[in-house]
Image (tube, rainbow, N blue to C red):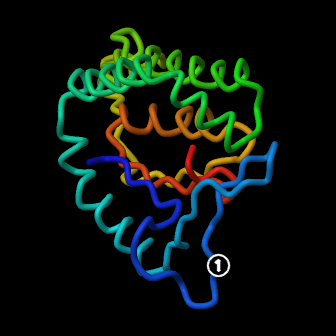
């Protein structure tokens, strides 16, 4: 498990003095889902879990991480209309725009799972270009940061979270996601 979402707890006690987060249909005002607010303790636990999972995730070969992104792509493709329906209901976007958000996310997943993108993350040797360093070589490597925090916006609740999370994951990072309180279901 490399991505931990913490929008709100579907179960468990809410933080003292906090009301449930309500997912509302902007067209009707209808509350169609409620989430209990996440406590500080739950966020700390999610972060600790992400930190524990990240080294094993980063140790996986890049091609394996990319294959998992490809699987995400395939599942999202199968469920793109469900995702678009959720976006439309919660965010208020017309169905065609909501579907475009899901399709753009498919494009991101496709892009970050391709071999040519992965090659940019592979270690590379370079020759120095100055006369004093003529016989020297430099190894450039890319190391993951660890856990990447992703704060989602309400206006593109699915696509913009994916735009940050997918490259973070393929690079060997874990991700802790905080969606907008206006679009927690997306």
Residue 29, image x, y percentages: 79, 53
Question: Which residue is drawn at the image coordinates 29% and 63% (left, top)?
Answer: 49
**Foreground of the two, 177 or 128:** 177
Residue 138, image x, y percentages: 34, 26
Dot 1 alpha-carbon crowd within 10 angstroms: few under 14, some 14 to 19, many 20 or more: few
Question: Which residue is drawn at the image coordinates 58% and 57% (left, top)?
Answer: 33
Residue 143, image x, y percentages: 34, 40
**Foreground of the two, 35 or 57:** 35
Query: In this orientation, does residue 180 appear?
Result: yes
Q: Classify mark 1: helix, strand or loop.
A: loop
**Image quadrant occupied by the C terminus:** top right
Query: In this orientation, does residue 137 appear?
Result: no
Image quarter for residue 180? bottom right
Residue 128, image x, y percentages: 41, 20
**Foreground of the two, 13 or 41:** 13
Question: Which residue is drawn at the image coordinates 56% and 32% (left, top)?
Answer: 163
Tell whether 44 sits left or right of 108.
left
Question: Which residue is drawn at the image coordinates 27% and 29% (left, top)?
Answer: 65
Q: Mark 1 points at which residue?
A: 19
Instruction: Give the vertical position of 131 relative to 34 (above or below).
Output: above
């Amino acid at each position: 498990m490399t991505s931990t979402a913490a929008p709100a707890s579907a179960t468990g006690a809410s933080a003292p003095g906090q009301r449930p987060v309500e997912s509302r249909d902007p067209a009707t005002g209808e509350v169609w889902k409620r989430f209990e607010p996440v406590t500080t303790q739950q966020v700390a636990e999610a972060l600790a879990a992400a930190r524990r999972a990240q080294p094993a995730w980063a140790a996986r070969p890049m091609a394996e991480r990319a294959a998992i992104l490809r699987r995400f792509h395939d599942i999202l493709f199968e469920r793109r209309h469900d995702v678009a329906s959720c976006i439309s209901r919660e965010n208020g976007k017309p169905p065609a725009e909501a579907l475009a958000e899901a399709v753009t996310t498919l494009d991101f997943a496709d892009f970050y799972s391709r071999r040519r993108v992965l090659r940019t993350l592979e270690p590379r040797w370079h020759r120095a270009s100055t006369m004093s360093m003529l016989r020297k070589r430099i190894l450039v490597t890319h190391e993951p940061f660890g856990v990447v925090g992703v704060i989602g916006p309400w206006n593109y609740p699915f696509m913009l979270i994916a735009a940050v999370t997918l490259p973070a994951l393929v690079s060997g990072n874990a991700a802790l996601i905080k969606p907008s309180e206006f679009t927690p279901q997306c």
